[in-house]
Image (cartoon, rainbow, N blue to C red):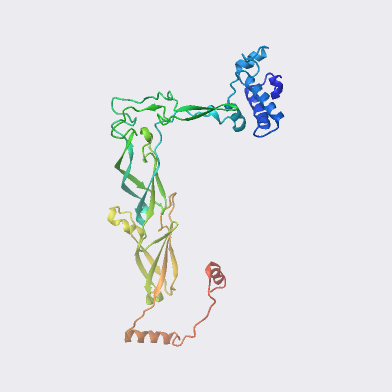
């Protein structure tokens, strides 16, 4: 029967159209899918037709009216299992899936180290020297893995392909698969005399010193990327990247929340009642011993107004942490009023006189509903409490 009619394609159909038609029919009539004997015969005819039309020489012979096979219909046919796998897996099976030899030169792995810095260093930036154990290019063989005076040679087993074909016979024909060459481990070349320094890997491990610049504004968990400072790859391949993960140590005074700093200051009851001005250190004060710059603002003035209540927050603008993209956070100072716990007779007498003058000798107290969470505080604010 005419192979063009069997596959349902025109005589001028291109290879892609013929292959597509064959895949569709092979999936329909394959014995594993359709056990009907008629379907099995049809599958043989379709496969025979595809064998003719997929081969340029056989197709040309058929178009000229000749016999594309020297031994008649199906005689000596070498129909490859690859074509059947092609029909089911889109050309991913058999010998067509060869990938060639593996490269000896490959990119190195990325590396990660952790670096602890102080809060001030994280806020304003710092430059540190790090000692890292990593892989570097072997200086003896310059990365190619061969001993001086020698060089890699082509693998005789696979002829440099890095793969060898394994053939099995089945009722469908020959099954050809490609596997990495065991002699050269898939590289296609063999190093007859490996470098003694690196054992043929092209790299050795060593400790080296790096300088890393930590930008101002980094936070706990921030990773700084050092491109090309990771491990050198096998065969002296390009180095990966080194990532420095920042861990910020806890500060005894300041607590960071985003780019804002929070701290607490305690004032005596009398200072809160009468008002006062306090001189307090900034976060930059931590850097005084590390730099001689006169531009550092190491302190600020906090005005405690008369009648300040315990728990009052005061915001000092732009005294927080610089942002990675510019700007600077605020410093929020919470004022805690300290009530004296021990009084001498004179102090107690003065306070009793003050209580009498203010009519607070026997206070009745004032009960209010407890504020729970943000919504409770907002409700009280709207109610004027």
Q: Nearer the viewer, residue 289 or 161?
A: 161
Horizontally, residue 62 falls left or right of residue 246, namely right
Q: Position of residue 90 (x, y in %)?
A: 60, 31
The image quarter in which residue 269 lies: bottom left
Q: Nearer the viewer, residue 47 or 327?
A: 47
Examine the rendered structure and indicate whether residue 99 appears above or below residue 126.
Answer: above
Q: Nearer the viewer, residue 357 or 83?
A: 83
Q: Which residue is depicted at the point 56% across and 70% down?
A: 379
Q: Nearer the viewer, residue 67 or 142?
A: 67
The mark total stands at 0
Q: Position of residue 271 (x, y in %)?
A: 37, 74
Q: Which residue is depicted at the point 45% across and 85% down?
A: 360
Q: Position of residue 117 (x, y in %)?
A: 35, 54
Q: Which residue is depicted at the point 40% across and 84% down?
A: 354
Q: Position of residue 367 (x, y in %)?
A: 52, 80
The N terminus sits in image quarter: top right
């Amino acid at each position: 029967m005419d192979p063009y009619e069997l596959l349902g394609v025109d005589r001028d159909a291109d290879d892609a159209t013929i292959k597509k038609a064959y895949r569709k029919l092979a999936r329909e009539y394959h014995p594993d899918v359709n056990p009907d004997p008629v379907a099995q015969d049809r599958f043989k005819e379709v496969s025979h037709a595809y064998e003719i039309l997929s081969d340029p020489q056989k197709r040309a012979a058929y178009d000229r009216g000749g016999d594309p096979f020297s031994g008649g219909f199906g005689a000596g046919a070498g129909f490859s299992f690859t074509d059947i796998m092609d029909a089911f897996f889109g050309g991913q099976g058999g010998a067509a899936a060869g990938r060639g030899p593996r490269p000896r030169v490959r990119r190195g792995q990325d590396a990660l180290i952790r670096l602890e810095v102080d809060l001030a260093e994280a806020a304003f930036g710092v430059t540190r020297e790090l000692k890292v154990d990593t892989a570097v290019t072997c200086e003896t063989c310059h990365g190619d893995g061969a001993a001086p005076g020698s060089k890699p040679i082509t693998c005789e087993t696979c002829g440099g392909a890095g793969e060898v074909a394994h053939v099995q016979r089945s009722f469908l024909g020959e099954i050809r698969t490609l596997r990495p060459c065991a002699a050269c481990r898939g590289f296609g070349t063999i190093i007859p005399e490996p470098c003694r320094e690196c054992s043929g890997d092209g790299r050795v491990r060593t400790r080296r010193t790096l300088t890393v610049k930590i930008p101002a504004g980094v936070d706990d968990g921030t990773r700084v990327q050092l491109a090309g400072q990771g491990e050198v790859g096998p065969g002296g391949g390009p180095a990966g990247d080194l990532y420095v993960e920042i861990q910020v140590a806890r500060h005894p005074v300041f607590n960071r929340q985003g780019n804002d700093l929070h701290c607490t200051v305690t004032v005596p009851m009398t200072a809160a009642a009468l008002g006062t001005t306090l001189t307090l250190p900034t976060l930059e004060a931590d850097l005084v011993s590390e730099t001689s710059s006169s531009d550092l603002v190491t302190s600020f003035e906090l005005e405690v107004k008369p009648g300040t209540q315990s728990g009052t927050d005061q915001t000092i603008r732009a005294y927080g942490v610089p942002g990675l993209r510019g700007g600077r956070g605020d410093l929020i100072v919470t004022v805690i009023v300290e009530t004296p716990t021990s009084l001498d007779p004179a102090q107690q007498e003065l306070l009793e006189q003050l209580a009498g003058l203010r009519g607070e000798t026997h206070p009745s107290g004032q009960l209010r509903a407890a504020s729970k969470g943000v919504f409770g505080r907002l409700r009280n604010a709207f109610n004027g409490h």
